[in-house]
């Protein structure tokens, strides 16, 4: 299952730190939990600083359960070390699947 996660950050500085330090750490730790990161983007021209990630869960996995397990793990805590959690103002999650007209299908 594919998920698009959109993080709204408190400032451009928070976005820079989250994108370059903390999401870089997530790449390895998420993989240990069966979550593959396909892309991590910065929104261009938006009204707030945002980071968008496209991740994929292993077939048959419950994304909500896997996310809860990961976010309560020592790996997640280590990934986030040094980042103030109030630097993330909000997270929007959207699960997606290819449409019949998707050229990659």
Image: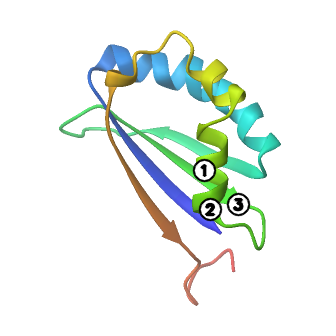
Q: Residue furthest bottom?
A: 100
Q: Nearer the viewer, residue 101 or 92?
A: 92
Count residues near mark 1 (Cα–Cα under 10 Å), then give few for <14, some for 14-19, many for 20+: some
Would you place residue 52 above or below residue 101 in this image?
Answer: above
> Quick one: SS at disc 1?
helix
| Crowd rating for badge 3 (residues with CA inside 10 Å; few <14, some 14–19, many 20+) | many
Which quadrant would the N terminus be assigned to in this image?
A: bottom right
Residue where numbered disc 2 is placed? 63
- Residue holding disc 1: 67
Q: Is residue 59 left or right of residue 14?
A: right
Q: Nearer the viewer, residue 17 or 105?
A: 17
Q: Residue sitting at 24 percent across and 40 percent down?
A: 46
Residue at x 72%, y 51% (from the top left corner): 35
Q: Nearer the viewer, residue 14 or 63?
A: 63
Q: Secondary structure at mark 2?
A: helix
In the image, 81: left or right of 86? right
Q: Are marks 2 and 1 in contact (CB under 8 Å)?
A: yes
- Residue that badge 3 annotates: 57
- Write the residue at 70% across / 34% down: 27
Provide the secondary structure element on which disc 3 rests. Answer: strand
């Amino acid at each position: 299952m594919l998920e698009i996660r959109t993080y709204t950050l408190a400032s451009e500085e928070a976005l820079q730190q989250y994108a370059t330090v903390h999401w870089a750490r997530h790449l390895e730790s998420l993989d240990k939990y069966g979550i593959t990161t396909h892309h991590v983007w910065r929104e261009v021209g938006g009204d707030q600083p945002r980071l968008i990630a496209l991740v994929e869960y292993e077939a048959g996995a419950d994304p909500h359960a896997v996310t809860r397990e990961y976010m309560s793990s020592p790996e997640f805590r280590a990934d986030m070390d040094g980042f103030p959690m109030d630097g993330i103002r909000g997270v929007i999650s959207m699960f997606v699947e290819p449409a019949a007209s998707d050229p990659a299908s």
